[in-house]
């Protein structure tokens, strides 16, 4: 379980990326993080595993206080947090298997990783994960030989190889086509359900988020402005997050606008149609 | 997915570079054999090296406590020669390399001109500056004039090649568009080629200025003037503190020209 | 035309004078060129203060003289050159090897994203690179011959010292250009510093590394052919002694051999680079 309390991040240049963000993610819950570009979604996710150092506030994963860890303890904590990236962030010139095994780097000493002699259990597990994401035949291929969707599956397998207690997912579908995006989102949510994994998914495709996540948090200029179940998201909330815009206009063919059900209906439609 | 399948517990990274098994075994052996042979043919006089280490320490000391004053007259003379021949050689090299570069561009020049110009470029590029300097010193006598000719000759090959490659890569549709207006050959070069290539040419000239200065510190060793001759004398006389001073000056000027040329390039673009 | 007329409602009269640049910019440009010409003339005069123009006028005769002495090249001299050629190849290869081995740590210390300290270590590494780059291998050889005595070792060390700067500079630029995302991803798994470098940075710079090393080897072959002029072994020593004894036909043979070696090494290096990348 993840608890974030009063998290604030101010960059050296003086921009405040996050302001007093507070929420909890219970076991098995998939949280969608939405908001305009620059709202601090990426910063929030990176504060949790401290790829970005938070300025103040606390973050607890279970009993561990993530904010005040020394570098050794921080690495141990990072092992418990799997991360999936926009643009996959695979090491392109390594094989798929090496990419998945790199999820175990925090557990093996340097000389073992240097000679690529990972424990048998890790390798077995890596194969199992590759099978789970449907890529077992591609284990010996180089990562840059795969398609976008396949690469993101490798990214998922790498994160799961860490046997994490929490998944951080940063724009997993940003560079994928609509169909692959849905497959990837489905895979992530299925896996979270299987393992009772909590996850924070940073996503800008609102309809896609609505369809797959259990809860939506909206950020605007570093503040949490919405925290609700996805099916209750309405126009007022969207305006709150993204600013004024004629949200119904996404469906131009509809001549008979029905403001109440419209926003949701339209969003759903977009989600399934694309 | 098969839920209860068992998965392998071993994995070996597939070979990436050398995929045939025979070569994978043979290659390290060949490399090892070469290294043994090569190192074996070294005749190292251990005593001489040990003796040299002490001298090396003295050189490092000279480098750390350079003596600029006692040989300042020679250093000054060498520096002036180096700097003047660097500048004149670069200017002349650029001027000559422009027609040759245009001549060596396949998309502009008739075939015979192209071949002649490419041949000039090839000769200029494949001969070491030092070797050219030896010949030019033999022909023109000692002094910076031979050095100037050497650097100019080397610059021509370098600049003309890059210029020609640039022109060949220049946007063909722009050249076509100007040609379609009925422009003559010279107008074509002026309107279609020059604007595309000019910024690069300035950048390359400044880069070559940099290289020419570095080379000017070397060709003095064979008598072509410049700071290299002063350095050679200093080392021959075991005056490591003066040698250190010269090297420091060379390093400083190289850094200065590098900074200066990158600044100037940004300014001109 | 009519559309223009109706829109502006003013008589259509356009200036017939059009200039490429503003007057001030043109003035500055002309002043710049003038300064360059003046500088050139001044440099030319300073440089040629000591030039004896009699020698210069005499140069064509000298050239003809030397040319006639060079031709025909003395091919019987070739067998005597094989051993020095082998030495030259060894100087280049072992020197490159040594230079590359020394350059790798320097590059990692100099790259902004892998250096342990941008304030203390990085400037030192950059200084090593600049020093090595500004001093030509022939000067390194000159120094080393004076220090550890004439011979192959001086040549090898000279080539190695000169290569550090070249390989180090290109390699640290390659390291700085690595994709930060891949590094971030491996860091996020809880990997240690060394593991991050080995898994995320090394695979990305490996092709550049091989390319740079082969490229430098090719350059080093060229440079090692002349190191003998200052006593650092190899075929350059034969060149020096032939020049000293004015045996121009031997010089011609040596030059042909050097050209051949350079061409072969260039082709070889280009091929290997293409195969590796």
Image (spheres, coloured by chain):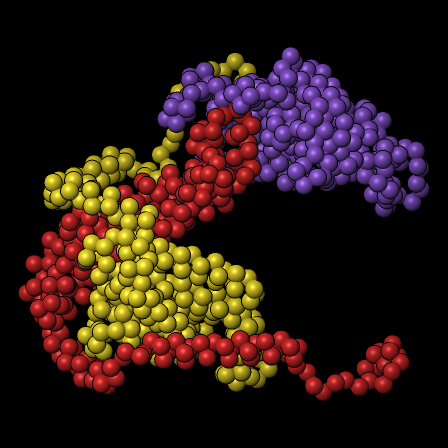
Chain colours: A purple, B yellow, C red
Identify which residue is drawn at 69% across, 21% down: A58
Q: Which x, y percent locates residue C25?
A: 62, 75
Q: Is residue A76 visible?
A: yes
The quarter of the image holding the N terminus of chain C is bottom right
Identify which residue is drawn at 34% across, 50% down: C132
Identify which residue is drawn at 38% across, 41% down: C106
User: Left or right of B113: which side holds C69?
Assistant: left
User: Left or right of C74: which side holds B175?
Assistant: right
Quadrant in the picture for residue C67: bottom left
Q: How many marks?
A: 0
Identify which residue is drawn at 23% across, 58% down: B234
Q: Is residue B34 visible?
A: no
User: Left or right of A167: which side holds B185?
Assistant: left
Q: Nearer the viewer, residue B49 or C74?
A: B49
User: Left or right of B106: which side holds B140?
Assistant: left
Q: Which x, y percent locates residue C62?
A: 17, 81
Q: Which x, y percent locates residue B113?
A: 37, 79
Farthest residue toward the front? B70
Q: Which x, y percent locates residue B126?
A: 28, 65
Quadrant in the picture for residue C223: bottom left
Quadrant in the picture for residue C252: bottom left
Q: Nearer the viewer, residue A168 or B255?
A: B255
């Amino acid at each position: 379980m993840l608890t974030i309390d009063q998290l604030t991040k101010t960059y050296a240049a003086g921009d405040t990326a996050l302001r007093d963000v507070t929420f909890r993610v219970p076991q098995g819950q998939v949280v969608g993080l939405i908001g305009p570009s620059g709202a601090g979604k990426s910063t929030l996710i990176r504060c949790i595993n401290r790829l970005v150092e938070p300025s103040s506030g606390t973050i607890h994963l279970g009993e561990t206080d993530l904010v005040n860890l020394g570098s050794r303890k921080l690495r141990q904590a990072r092992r418990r947090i799997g991360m999936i990236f926009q643009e996959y962030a695979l090491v392109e010139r390594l094989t798929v298997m090496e990419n998945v095994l790199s999820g175990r780097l925090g557990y093996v000493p340097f000389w073992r990783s240097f000679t690529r002699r990972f424990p048998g259990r890790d390798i077995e597990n890596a194969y199992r994960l590759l099978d789970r994401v449907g890529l077992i035949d591609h284990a010996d291929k180089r990562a840059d030989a795969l398609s976008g969707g396949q690469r993101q599956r490798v990214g998922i397998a790498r994160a799961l190889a860490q046997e994490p207690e929490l998944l951080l997912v940063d724009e997993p579908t940003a560079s994928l086509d609509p169909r692959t995006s849905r497959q990837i989102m489905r895979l992530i949510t299925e896996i979270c359900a299987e393992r009772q994994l909590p996850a924070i998914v940073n996503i800008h495709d609102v309809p896609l988020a609505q369809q797959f996540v259990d809860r939506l948090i909206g950020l605007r200029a570093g503040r949490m402005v919405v925290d609700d179940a996805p099916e209750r998201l309405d126009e007022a909330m969207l305006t709150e997050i993204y600013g004024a815009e004629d949200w119904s206009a996404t469906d131009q063919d509809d001549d008979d606008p029905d403001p109440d059900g419209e926003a949701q209906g339209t969003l759903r439609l977009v989600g399934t149609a694309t | 997915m098969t839920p209860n399948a068992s998965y392998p517990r071993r994995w070996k990274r597939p070979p990436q570079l050398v995929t045939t098994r025979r070569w994978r075994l043979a290659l390290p052996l060949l490399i090892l054999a070469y290294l043994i042979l090569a190192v074996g043919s070294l005749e190292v006089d251990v005593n001489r090296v040990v003796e040299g280490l002490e001298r090396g320490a003295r050189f490092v000391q000279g480098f750390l406590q350079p003596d600029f004053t006692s040989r300042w007259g020679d250093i000054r003379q060498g520096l002036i020669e180096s700097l003047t021949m660097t500048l004149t050689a670069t200017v002349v090299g650029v001027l000559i390399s422009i027609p040759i570069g245009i001549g060596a561009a396949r998309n502009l020049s008739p075939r015979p001109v192209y071949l002649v110009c490419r041949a000039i470029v090839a000769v200029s590029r494949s001969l070491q500056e030092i070797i050219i300097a030896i010949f030019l010193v033999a022909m023109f006598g000692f002094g910076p004039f031979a050095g100037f000719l050497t650097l100019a000759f080397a610059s021509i090959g370098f600049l003309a090649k890059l210029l020609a490659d640039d022109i060949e890569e220049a946007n063909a549709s722009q050249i076509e568009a100007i040609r379609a207006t009925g422009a003559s050959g010279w107008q074509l070069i002026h309107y279609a080629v020059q604007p595309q290539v000019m910024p690069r040419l300035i950048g390359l000239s400044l880069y070559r200025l940099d290289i020419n200065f570095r080379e000017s510190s070397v060709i003095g060793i064979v008598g072509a003037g410049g700071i290299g001759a002063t350095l050679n004398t200093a080392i021959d006389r075991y005056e490591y503190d003066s040698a250190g001073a010269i090297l420091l000056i060379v390093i400083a000027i190289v850094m200065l020209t590098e900074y200066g040329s990158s600044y100037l390039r940004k300014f001109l673009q | 035309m009519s559309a223009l007329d109706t829109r502006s409602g003013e008589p259509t009269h356009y200036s017939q004078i059009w200039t490429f640049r503003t007057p001030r910019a043109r003035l500055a440009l002309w002043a710049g060129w003038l300064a360059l010409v003046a500088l050139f003339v001044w440099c030319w005069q300073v440089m040629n203060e000591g030039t004896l123009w009699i020698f210069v006028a005499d140069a064509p005769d000298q050239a003809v003289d030397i040319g006639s002495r060079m031709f025909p090249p003395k091919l019987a001299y070739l067998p005597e050159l094989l051993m020095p050629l082998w030495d030259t190849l060894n100087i280049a290869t072992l020197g490159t090897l040594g230079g590359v081995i020394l350059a790798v740590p320097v590059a990692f210390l100099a790259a902004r994203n892998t250096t342990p300290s941008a304030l203390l270590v990085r400037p030192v590494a950059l200084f090593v690179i600049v020093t090595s780059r500004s001093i030509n291998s022939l000067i390194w050889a000159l120094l080393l011959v004076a220090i550890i005595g004439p011979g192959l070792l001086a040549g090898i060390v000279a080539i190695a010292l000169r290569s550090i700067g070249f390989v180090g500079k290109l390699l640290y630029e390659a390291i700085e250009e690595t994709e930060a995302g891949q590094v971030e991803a491996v860091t996020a798994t809880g990997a240690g510093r060394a593991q991050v470098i080995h898994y995320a940075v090394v695979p990305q710079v490996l092709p550049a590394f091989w390319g740079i090393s082969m490229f430098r080897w090719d350059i080093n072959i060229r440079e090692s052919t002349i190191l003998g002029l200052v006593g650092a072994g190899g075929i350059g020593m034969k060149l020096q002694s032939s020049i000293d004894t004015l045996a121009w036909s031997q010089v011609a043979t040596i030059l042909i051999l050097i050209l051949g070696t350079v061409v072969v090494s260039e082709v070889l290096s280009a091929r290997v680079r293409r195969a590796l990348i």
